[in-house]
Amino acid sequence: MPKRKKSKTELKQILSELCQYIQQLEPKAQILKITPHRLYEADDGWIEVLLPYREWNRKADKIADAIYKRVWEIEMDQGYFVGVSLRTLDEMKALAQG
């Protein structure tokens, strides 16, 4: 099967829908950055998310599982790989200090 040509418009739509999905899973999550182009060799776009938890917990695990399942579905169905970085409050604090 020939490779499908990827479109910037379609990628932006996918990123927007994925951000909406993240907000549905956790309304207090903050979308820190959306990158509608490659950051790394294997990805088509990237989303950075701050979860409203001090540290990684069971709820964060469930949210992560749901998001990564959706990312996999997008890759399988539409051929786009979107990287998602999930951070907690303590992780962001450590990054800022480091």
Image (spheres, grey):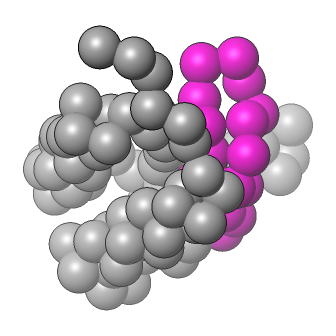
Q: Position of residue 79 (x, y in %)?
A: 38, 33
Q: Nearer the viewer, residue 85 or 1?
A: 1
The stretch of residues the image draws in magenta is 32-47
Residue 67 visible in the displayed image: yes
Q: Is residue 92 magenta?
A: no
Q: Residue furthest bottom?
A: 27
Residue 4 horizontal/vertical position (percent):
45, 32
Q: Quadrant of the N terminus?
A: top left
Which quarter of the rendering shows the C terminus? top right
Height in image: 90 above or below 33? above
State whether residue 95 is above or below residue 8. Answer: above
Q: From the viewer's perspective, is residue 18 above or below residue 92? A: below
> Which residue, as the protein is rendered here, is positioned at the far front?
2
Q: Quadrant of residue 74?
A: top left
Image mark count: 0
The percent position of residue 17, horizontal first and vertical second, equals: 37, 72
Residue 51 position, x and y percent, is: 43, 64
Q: Residue at x 72, y 24 (%)?
A: 40
Along the horizontal axis of the image, is 5 left or right of 38? Answer: left
Q: Identify which residue, 59 or 3, lies in the foreground.
A: 3
Who's the residue at 20% across and 72% down the image? 25
Q: Residue at x 40, y 50 (%)?
A: 55
Q: Is residue 89 visible?
A: no
Which residue shows up at 55% across the image and 56% down it?
Answer: 11
47 relative position to 70: left or right = right
In the rendered image, residue 39 lying in the magenta stretch gets the answer yes
Q: Nearer the viewer, residue 15 or 91?
A: 15
